[in-house]
Image (tube, rainbow, N blue to C red):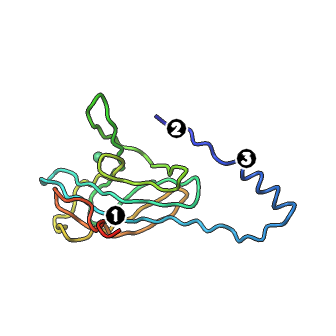
Amino acid sequence: MNDIIARPLVTAAAVASVCLLWGCERPPKTVKVTVEQAWVRLPAAAGVPGAAYFTLRSNSSPMALASVSSPQVDRIELHDSQMDRGVMRMRPIATAEFPETGEMEFKPGGKHAMLFGIDPSVKPGGKISLTFRFNPPRQIVADADVVGPAGTAPGHGGH
Ligand SMILES: [Cu+2]
C-alpha cells in the first residue's frame, strides 16, 4: 500500500535554470507546518486507549509527522484505519507522509493518534498538551480539546 511519491524534481530543475538566466529575487521559502483543530476523545473505560484527531498543514515537501507525545499521556502511537473484508482495522504506522496537497487530516475512521495511559486528571472540557514532531525536524506544541467517549469534534459549527 505504499504509494511512491513522485517528487517534483523536474520542476525544481526548471526553476533552477530560470534562476541562472534571470537571477532569483525571491526570498527563500520559509518552511511552515501547522497543527489545527486538535481534539481528543477519552476512552469509555479505564485501561482502554483514547484517540487524538487533528489537521496538519505543510508548505514544504517532503514532510512527515514522525511522532506525537504528551506529558499527560504514557504513550502515543500513530495509527491508520483500513477496511479489511468489511471490517475496520487499525494498524500502527511509523510516520505519516504529507500528501501533495500539503494537508493531512487525522479523523475518526482514518488516521489517528492512539493515546495509551491518559492521566486521570484529564476530563471532558479540559485540554491535553500534544507535542508533534516532524521530519525534517520540526516541533509544534498544541492544546487539544478533550471530549467524552461519545463526543464529536468540538467547535466546528461556526465555519
Ligand atoms: Cu488506533
Instruction: Label 3, secondary structure: give it.
Output: helix
Asked whether 133 or 157 is in front, the reply is 157
Placement of the C terminus among the 4 image quadrants: bottom left
Q: What residue type is labelled 3?
A: Val
Sequence-first tag of 1 and 2: 2
C-alpha distance separating marks 1 and 2:
27 Å
Say if disc 2 is inside 8 Å of ligand 1. no
Q: Which amino acid is tagged 1?
A: Ala
Q: Where is residue 47 in the image (x, y as percent from the top left)?
A: 15, 51
The answer for how far apart the CA atoms under marks 3 and 2 are is: 19 Å
Question: 133 or 108: which is nearer to us?
Answer: 108
Q: Residues within 10 Å of mark 1 (few under 14, many from 20)?
A: many
From the image, tell me which residue sits under label 1: 38
Name the residue furthest right.
Answer: 21
- Ligand 1 is within 8 Å of the C-beta of the residue at disc 1: no
- Which residue position holds label 2? 3
Q: Is mark 3 within 8 Å of ligand 1?
A: no
- Please, what secondary structure does the residue beneath circle 1 have? strand
Rendered location of residue 150, percent (x, y): 16, 56
Residue 12 place in picture, x, y as percent = 72, 53
x, y percentage for residue 23?
83, 66
* Mark-to-mark CA distance, 3 and 1: 36 Å
Q: In what element is the residue under mark 2? A: loop
Residue position for label 3? 10
Looking at the rendered structure, the kind of residue marked 2 is Asp
Tell me which label, 3 or 2, sits earlier in the chain.
2
Q: In which quarter of the image is residue 84?
A: top left
